Image (tube, coloured by chain):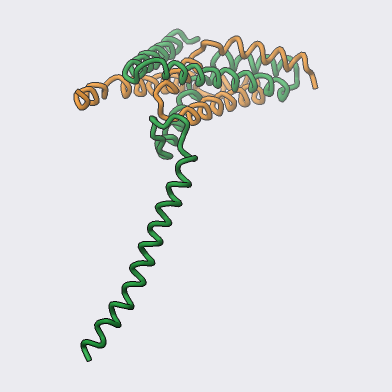
Chain colours: A green, B orange
Amino acid sequence: MKLDSVPLNVSRISPIESETELKNGIECDSKNIIIEPLKPIDDDCAEKPQSALVTFGTTFITIFLAEIGDKTQLSTLLMSAQSHSPWVVFMGSGAALITTSLLGVLLGSWIATRLSPKTVEKAAGVMLLLISLMLFWDVVIGY
Amino acid sequence: MDWHLLGLSFITVFLSELGDKSQLAAIALSGRCQSKRAVFFGTAGALLLTSLLGALAGGTVAELLPTRILKAIAAVGFAILALRLLLPNNETSADSE
C-alpha cells in the first residue's frame, strides 16, 4: 500500500515543480527582455518614483513661493492690464518660462556630465544658498 | 491673435527670467542627477502658475497675498535644500574612503 502511494505522490509533485521552474525561467527571461530597453538613458542615476515625486514637489513649491510677486510676475500683470488681453500675455510669458526652465535643466544636466558628482553637489548647494540669500535680501529690502 | 503682444510678452519675460533665481535653481537642482524631468516639470509648472495668476488677477495678487512672508518661506526652503546638499557630504565621503 505504502509503496504504491509514494511513487504516485512523487509523480504528482514533480510536474508541478518543473512547471513552476519553467514559469520562473520564463518570467526571468521576460523581465530581462522588458526591463533592458526601459532603462533610463543615464543608467548611473537610479530613479525612484518616490524621489522624483519629492523632487517635483519641492521644486514646485519653492519656485512658486519665490516667484510670487517677483518682477516677472509684475511685468506679466502690467502687460495684461495694459493690453486687456490676458490670455495672449499668458501664452507669451508661459512659452518664455517653459523655454528658460528647459534651458536651465539642460544646462544643469550638461554641467553634471562634465564634473564629478561631489563637485556638482557642492556647487548646487552653494547656488541654492545664494538663491536663498537673494530671496532674504528681497524680503529685507521690500523689493 | 495679437502676434505683436505675444512676441513682446515672450521676449520681455524671457530676458527677465534668463539668469534669474528660478533658472539658477533649475540648473542647481538638475545638476544632482536625481531626476531632470521632475525638476523641469516642477519649475515650469510653478512658473506657469505664477504667470497665470499674474495675467488673470492683474494687480490684485500683490495686495491679496503676503508676498514677503511667502518669499521668506521660499528662502528658508532653498536654504534647507542647500544644507541638505552640503551637509551629508561628510557621511558619503567617509563611506567611500
Residue A22 location in percent, x, y?
A: 39, 62
Say which residue appears at 63% left-offset and 18% top-offset.
A96
Q: Residue furthest right?
A: B1
* Most foreground residue, A97 or A8: A8
Quick check: A130 above or below A65? above
Q: Residue at x 44, y 15 (%)?
A: A111
Give the quadrant of residue A94: top right
Q: Position of residue B64 (x, y in %)?
A: 56, 24
Left or right, A95 with respect to B22, comes to: right
Q: Is residue A35 above or below residue A21?
A: above
Q: Quadrant of the N terminus of chain A?
A: bottom left
Task: Using residue B60 as the reference point, say whether residue B28 is left or right of it.
Answer: left
Closer to us: A79 or B26: B26
Q: Which residue in the rendered view is the most extreme toward the top?
A: A141
Q: Nearer the viewer, residue B75 or A6?
A: A6
- State which quadrant residue B80 falls in: top left
User: x, y percentage for residue B39?
Assistant: 48, 27
Q: Residue at x 75, y 20 (%)?
A: A84
Identity of the residue drawn at 52% across and 10% down: B19
